[in-house]
Image: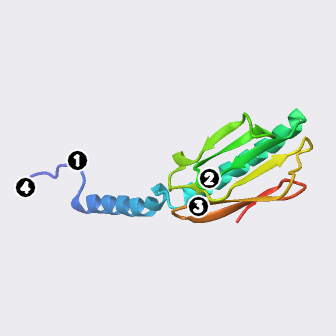
């Protein structure tokens, strides 16, 4: 009889078990790689940050600053002068999902950071819609 030799490698049972575990992990992680709903959420968060940036800029500079949203556009202007000149343009198209603005409105903050009037901006994408609200007096933003 030949002596038992220790061979290297995997048995079929070990290979099937390892592949099964890898498959289960891949199936569990698959939703994390999809874009389901993130583009709309990201657009809302970016817009809220730009509104806050414009508000802080008005307070720091001691002058009125504004944002301009136009219905049907995939971009808007923020941190502009009160007359709409200058400012920065925020393009939402890199976020994907067909995100666009569904409201035409200007939001202007005075030198104290107060909005001249409350405002609402609706963002629409293939995943649905959300409305970003700017509260009067405080300029606090919220999304629904």
Image location (x, y in percent) of residue 69: 68, 50
Nearest-to-viewer mark from 3 and 1: 3
* Residue 37 position by quadrant: bottom right
* SS at circle 4: loop
The reply, left or right, for residue 106 in relation to residue 70 is right
Nearest-to-viewer mark from 1 and 4: 1
Q: Residue tagged by mark 1?
A: 8
Q: Which mark, residue 43? A: 2
**Spatial distance from mark 1 to mark 4, Cα to Cα?**
21 Å
Q: Which mark, residue 124? A: 3
Q: Earlier in the sequence, mark 3 or mark 1?
A: 1
* Residue at the image position 50 percent from the left and 51 percent from the top: 96
Q: Earlier in the sequence, mark 2 or mark 1?
A: 1
* Residue at the image position 58 percent from the left and 48 percent from the top: 92
Q: Earlier in the sequence, mark 3 or mark 2?
A: 2
Q: Residue tagged by mark 4?
A: 1
**Spatial distance from mark 3 to mark 1, Cα to Cα?**
59 Å
* SS at circle 3: strand
The reply, left or right, for residue 69 in relation to residue 2 is right
**Spatial distance from mark 2 to mark 1, Cα to Cα?**
54 Å
Can the viewer see residue 70?
Answer: yes
**Spatial distance from mark 3 to mark 2, Cα to Cα?**
10 Å
Q: Earlier in the sequence, mark 3 or mark 4?
A: 4
């Amino acid at each position: 009889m030949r002596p038992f030799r220790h061979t290297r490698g995997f048995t079929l049972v070990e290979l099937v078990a390892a592949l099964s575990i890898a498959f289960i992990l891949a199936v569990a992680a698959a939703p994390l790689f999809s874009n389901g709903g993130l583009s709309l959420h990201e657009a809302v968060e970016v817009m809220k940050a730009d509104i806050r940036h414009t508000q802080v800029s008005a307070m720091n500079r001691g002058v009125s600053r504004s944002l301009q949203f136009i219905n049907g556009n995939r971009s808007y202007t923020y941190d502009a002068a009160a007359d709409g000149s200058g400012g920065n343009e925020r393009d939402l198209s890199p976020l994907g999902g067909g995100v666009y603005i569904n409201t035409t409105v200007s939001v202007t903050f005075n030198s104290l950071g107060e909005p001249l009037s409350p405002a609402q901006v609706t963002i629409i994408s293939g995943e649905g819609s959300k409305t970003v609200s700017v509260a009067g007096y405080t300029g606090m933003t919220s999304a629904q």
